[in-house]
Image (tube, rainbow, N blue to C red):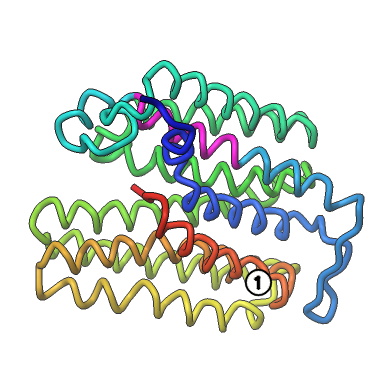
């Protein structure tokens, strides 16, 4: 018998919170803040409205994307994960498909309330998500790029609050693409019994991510001093679990390194947002972390 709670589980609410962090980062980078002098920030009704629309958009896009992930994996999950909503009978493929389509359509509609560019970016994210769910995740190289592109596009969706800035800041989308590739390499290390080469490669990619964030100091609107405390926290979250997993080659330790990488997505966003809009705004983004952690206790994240 189907239940409303099962359909909510399909949306992975804890993961959606990390997508909201992307939007808040992009919004800060766009310069849509009324002011950020002295490390402060200020909202007005004029700039708060597009932020709320873009948050609604990412909820729909991310939620719809992960719902369709379970739709495409329904047959496989009946064998490997029968406890999931669709295999357990608590949700149906038809019902999940309708929900996923409604969420993706709603996300695109919400984005259209901000600008035409926002709508086009939302459409691109929806297509990338469906491509990943259908075929992308099965490809060893294009899969991580496909997944990372969804994240990078989501960040640019936040930037589209100020459409003319998308063309100027397109390159910041490369940061989440590389970061997602690193997490994927770690997870593959688990699949292969703890592949040291995969884990070492992930450390290199993590280092590139940190270097990329520090290079943003070349932008006149980015103050790296506000980012440093968040970057230290970011490094504390991602490196120790990965280093502990390397010599042990234990699946549990590698799994912890993967989870740490996923959780640290919010910290990474907070560190960059702080550089663009000041440390108080960075703290505001960081507050999404405990929200995601608490929700993860009730809802699956994978």
Q: Residue at x 42, y 54 (%)?
A: 298
Query: Can you identify the residue that label 1 sits on?
Result: 282
Q: In the rendered image, which quarter is residue 125 located in?
A: top right
Residue 250 x/y as whole percent = 11, 67
Q: Is residue 223 left or right of residue 139?
A: right
Whether residue 61 can be seen here: yes
Nearer to us in this view, 218 or 43: 43
Does the segment drawn in magenta span residue 123? no
Is most of the magenta stretch helix, strand or loop? helix
Residue 241 x/y as whole percent = 27, 74
Please determine whether, in this image, residue 182 is positioned above or below residue 119.
below
Outermost residue to the front: 1
Q: Residue at x 16, y 56 (%)?
A: 190
Nearer to us in this view, 50 or 289: 289
Please determine whether, in this image, residue 98 is positioned above or below residue 191.
above
Please determine whether, in this image, residue 169 is positioned above or below residue 125.
below
Q: In the rendered image, which quarter is residue 164 located in?
A: top right
Whether residue 73 can be seen here: no
Callout 1: 10 Å neighbours few (<14), some, many (20+)?
A: many
Magenta residue span: 59-71
Residue 214 x/y as whole percent = 55, 73
Q: In the rendered image, which quarter is residue 154 located in?
A: top right
């Amino acid at each position: 018998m189907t239940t409303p709670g099962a359909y909510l589980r399909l949306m992975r609410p804890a993961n959606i919170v990390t997508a909201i962090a992307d939007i808040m980062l992009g919004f800060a980078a766009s310069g849509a803040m009324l002011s950020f002098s002295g490390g402060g920030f200020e909202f007005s009704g004029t700039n708060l409205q597009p932020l709320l629309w873009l948050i609604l958009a990412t909820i729909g896009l991310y939620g719809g994307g992960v719902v369709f992930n379970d739709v495409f994996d329904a047959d496989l999950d009946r064998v490997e994960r029968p406890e999931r909503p669709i295999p357990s009978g608590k949700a149906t493929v038809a019902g999940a498909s309708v929900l996923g389509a409604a969420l993706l359509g709603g996300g695109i509609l919400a984005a259209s309330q901000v600008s035409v560019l926002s709508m086009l970016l939302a459409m691109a994210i929806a297509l990338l998500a469906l491509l990943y769910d259908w075929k992308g995740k099965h490809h060893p190289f294009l899969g991580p790029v496909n997944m990372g592109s969804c994240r990078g596009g989501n960040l640019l969706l936040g930037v589209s609050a100020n459409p003319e800035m998308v063309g100027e800041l397109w390159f910041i989308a490369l940061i989440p693409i590389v970061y997602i590739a690193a997490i994927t390499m770690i997870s593959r290390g688990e699949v292969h019994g703890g592949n040291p080469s995969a884990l070492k490669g992930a450390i290199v990619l993590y280092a590139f991510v940190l270097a990329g964030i520090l290079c943003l100091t070349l932008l006149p609107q980015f103050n790296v001093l506000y980012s440093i405390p968040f970057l230290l926290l970011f490094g504390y979250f991602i490196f120790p679990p990965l280093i502990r997993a390397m010599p042990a080659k234990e699946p549990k330790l590698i799994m912890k390194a993967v989870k740490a990488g996923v959780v640290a997505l919010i910290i990474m966003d907070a560190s960059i947002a702080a550089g663009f809009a000041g440390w108080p705004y960075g703290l505001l983004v960081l507050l999404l972390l405990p929200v995601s952690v608490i929700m993860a206790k009730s809802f699956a994240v994978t």
